[in-house]
Image (cartoon, helix red, strand yellow):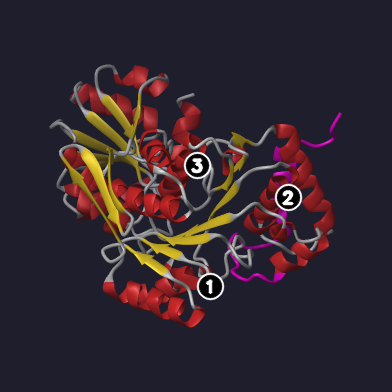
Amino acid sequence: MRAETSDIILEKMMALHPKIIDLTLDRVWRLLEALDHPETRLPPVVHIAGTNGKGSTLAMIRAGIEGAGQTAHAYTSPHLARFNERIRVAGDLIEEDQLADVLEICWKANAGAAITYFEITTIAALVAFVETTADWTLLEVGLGGRLDATNVVERPALTVITPVAFDHEQYLGDTITKIAREKAGIIKRGVPCVVGPQRDEALEVIEDVAARMGSELLVYGQHWHVWEERGRLVYQDERGLLDLPHPILRGEHQVRNAGAALAALRHLGFDEAACEHAMTDAVWPARMQRLKTGPLVDAAGTAEVWLDGGHNPAAGAAVAQTLDELPERQTHLIVGMLSTKDVIGFLAPIAARAVGLHAVDIPDAVATLPAKDTASAGRDVGLDSRVSGSVLEAVQDIIAQDPEARILICGSLYLAGAVLQENG
């Protein structure tokens, strides 16, 4: 019987570096060398960076690949309820035995040296991927791009950069130009790059980096176009036009994410049937997800309960757009955020679409913004705001006032994960 579970090993890994984030690739290269460079033995890689839309775009690419009868490894972060969610091996969530095995392999090879939790667990994912045959590998950047632990594949099949916006300024820089340069660090010499909608200053940086690297760009608005028409999604590039079902993932922003996924699939040689699967089969929890069952839903009675993990100003704007698309109903917010986030920037676009805000602490999150501060930010943007002791307490308070409410729990992926665990 195994002496240690994956949870125990992961807990030990948290103590290997005093900082959660410390951007450099030196420690990553050291451990990869000790493990005989698993990054060189992966199936063809699609590497995805950007501020918003990375996970949704990856989910749609994976749905297209699997709809074509092929398999893909996938690495995403952070997880919502269980660490296993970060690693899909040939399409399936990694099993506990394999996860514990690859974590132990990396733990022993690291020999107690300093390395961040994200770095060593990313390498564990790569070790898992080389143990199982698959047709593709999909890697989502954790933070930035240039110095992210996923940025170790010398020649991926394709890179993708989704929209660049403000987030993690303390690590990536305080201007869109600086942030875009970090994201563009995934561009590799001679490797094509799909580029989603960008601000002009971000696109200029991406084009500059691509020109120096000799990388062909496939840019939204230039090389491919996507729009919604009569409830369908229309995509056009130099190969022609596709008339597809609307993406199953909700929100106007998902149309643009879908365009990036389709551009990637088309470049990789997938046909229209695969592109249709990308629209209809993608699954990406906590992105304007309507909760249908569970204790919170039961407590809400006839009220709707929605969940979104967005946490920066661009995500707030996307949530606001999605609320505009839903049938009219009074929306009440339950918000918990990290202290490192731009709370006002996130809430400002949503404020006009909501009648009130209940602020909560994020359970078990050291960096949670105190609920009283979240409530204060809510008042600053014009929302009737109060503090609740828990999400359940907030739901109960809301339905006591408005039994037919639309309840949106939002502000953090960590809060979304806690909700998904609580709601079973």
Mark 3 → mark 1, Cα distance in angstroms: 23 Å
Image coordinates for residue 272, horizontal then vertical, percent? 37, 42
In the figure, 239 relative to 219: above or below? above
Name the element at disc 3. helix
Identify the residue under disc 2.
Answer: 127
Name the element at disc 2. helix
**Looking at the rendered structure, which numbered label has been put on residue 65?**
3
Q: Which residues are drawn in magenta?
A: 1-26
Name the element at disc 1. loop
Q: Which marked residue is nearer to the observer: mark 1 or mark 2?
A: 1
Identify the residue under disc 1.
Answer: 190
Instruction: Say whether residue 130 is visible.
Output: yes
Q: Is residue 323 left or right of residue 94?
A: left
Q: Is residue 91 left or right of residue 207?
A: right
Image coordinates for residue 399, horizontal then vertical, percent? 24, 23
Q: What amino acid does circle 3 point to?
A: Ile
